[in-house]
Amino acid sequence: MVCSSRARRVIAHCSAAGRVALASLDSYSPAAQDCEERARRFVRGTWRRSVAEYIPSPTEWVRNQVELYESTDGVEGNDLRGMPVVIVTHRGRRTGAVRKTPLMRVADGDAYVLVGSLGGAPKNPVWVYNLMADPNVEVRDRADVQSMHARLVEDPDERARLWGLAVEAYPEYADYQERTERVIPLFRAEPA
């Protein structure tokens, strides 16, 4: 068993059965083996949450909107400030956990434009970094759910065209860009 302080911190979060099994040297019990494997993965730097684990947003209104949207197939919870939204499902770059983010619906043919505005805040929203690390996403537009690949838009001409679509769909984006010194990132989510 790895005994570094980092491993001990992970073991502290293992199940009670796992800790008891380790303490009693019953290293063959499934709980003890699971606890040991968690500690090993953490120490090796490969700590990742379960592939299917969903961590709801810590922001209450986001959590509530995602839950309402998904539980009604987008019949309810499908707008924000009177404008239509989509739910983008992505992976956390640090945890590997599933995350869900409501974004304004900006369609471009069979693709979607994902706008990292965060209301004109000085920093990018966390989901921008998640998409840079893993561009495979799922976009839910009401009851329609599609696997997509989100590509950061870097070409100036394409960016100008897509920014025009974004501002047309949600005029506040123009104000958000004026509020911040950063260039608001755009992703084009295309069918996978």
Image: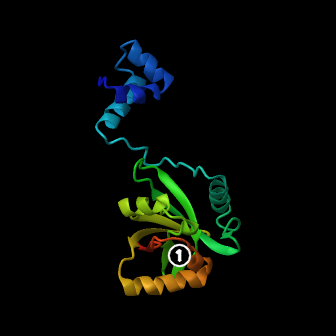
Q: Is residue 141 visible?
A: no
Instruction: Name the quarter where the N terminus is drawn.
Output: top left
The secondary structure type at the circle numbered 1 is helix
Q: Name the side, left or right, on which 120 lies relative to 4.
A: right
| Location of residue 33 (image quadrant) | top left
Q: Name the side, left or right, on which 109 lies relative to 135.
A: right
Front position in the image: 5 or 151: 5
Q: Is residue 40 visible?
A: yes
Front position in the image: 164 or 20: 164
Name the residue: 50% across, 64% down: 122
103, above or below 68, in the image: below
Name the residue: 57% across, 68% down: 103
Residue 152 appears at what percent x and percent y?
39, 72
187, above or below 123, in the image: below
Residue picked out by circle 1: 177
Residue 138 appears at what percent x and percent y?
48, 64
